Image (tube, rainbow, N blue to C red):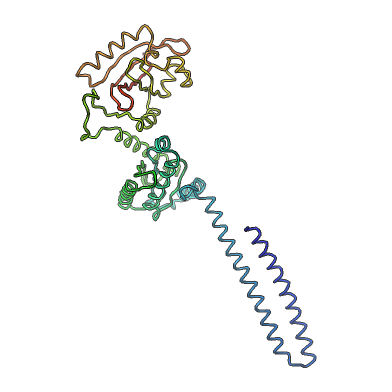
Amino acid sequence: MKAKKRKRIGVINGILVLLLSVLSLGIGLATIILYRENVKWMLGMFIAMAFYLVLVITFLVINWWDALSTNHELEEVRKIAYSDKMTDLENRQAYDEYIALLNERIAAGDIDERLLVLMMDVNGLKKTNDIFGHIAGDELLIGSAECIVKAFGAYGRCFRAGGDEFIVIAVMEPETFEKRRDELVRNLAEWQGKHIKGIAISIGKVNQCEYPELSMEELIDIADRRMYEDKQHYYASQLSVPENEQVDVNRMRFVDNFTLTKYTMPIIQQMAEVIPGGFFIYKEDAKREILYLNRKVLYIYGCKTRDEFMELTGGTFQGMVHPEDFDKIQKSIDMQIDDEKSDGMDHVIYRIVRRDGEVRTVDDYGHFSHSDDYGDIYYVFINDITAE
């Protein structure tokens, strides 16, 4: 449609140029002829000149309008190229170009010392996608973007770097940041959509004046680390049982700081993948089925995939333990858990048989709990101590 419109304007411009050329030649010839014939040619010339001026003005107006439309189209193209389609924030390309510009300013010593970088990551996006679907997850991102722009848009530029990660690069006083951050947290908590009620974001901040010698990439790395520290605190707080929550002692043997439900399982899995050492969860029943294990457990057992681990162990805690050690360590676990002073904790050492047949020794720290969704369960931290 735009190409046809531009072609039509080009044709009209060509016709106007031709008419203006012919009319200019005609006016010149008419002036000479009428002057020689000594006739009253002023009226004719006035009419001709008026027509000529109309054509000139029309030509100029059409070209002005064409230029204006072109600029508008270029702005639209730029917006598409530099904007995130979902959130309408600036996208990764715009972010990369701005970082390069700021690095030039830092190198030239022409940077505002009040510059700050905010790394923000939406909490619970994977859980939201897994439980409520990607429509709800998209709404979580859109709501986050709206609140971020409302809080910081007037002070700098807001980017969606990808996934659930947002970056703000702004210039503001520390007092202003505190107020804007509080407003952001409040707006996020109050935000409501069709599927989402309330949003939580982890934030990492670094000021340029803290590390004036660093590049923007190095400042961003610092902000990123601080953001992940904030995220760890957030998830830890979400897994705590509130002090005023009533615990049914007939169904839960121990008050537990880890409340495993179908909603918190994705959060625990996400945290477990970044901890040092093996971690798994299994049901305390006759089968002792493995509910979850992290990648470090696969490594300890010499497995590359979960399927290999399940084939090796049968997907049970008993299958993880050397056959000659299981009865002894299970008795020890039961005795420790039954001890009122244990607070649901146990510690055992036993042998395992890796997928390649090698026998290794592991250190096992377990914690017994009860889950309404999964029943009696154990959280277990495990490490290979053979070399020790």
What residue appears at the point 78 percent right and 93 percent down from the top-left corner? 38
Q: Position of residue 240 (x, y in %)?
A: 27, 32
Q: Where is residue 290 in the image (x, y as percent from the top left)?
A: 38, 20
Viewer-side residue, 371 vs 156: 371
Specify whether 97 is left or right of 267.
right
What residue appears at the point 24 percent right and 15 percent down from the top-left corner? 336
The quadrant of the rendering that contains the C terminus is: top left
Is 215 above or below relative to 257? below
How many numbered circles are shown? 0
Which corner quadrant of the image does residue 281 belong to? top left
Viewer-side residue, 375 vs 158: 375
Is 307 above or below relative to 62? above
Which corner quadrant of the image does residue 1 belong to? bottom right
Viewer-side residue, 281 vs 171: 281
What residue appears at the point 22 percent right and 28 percent down from the top-left corner? 248
Q: Where is residue 145 in the image (x, y as percent from the top left)?
A: 41, 48
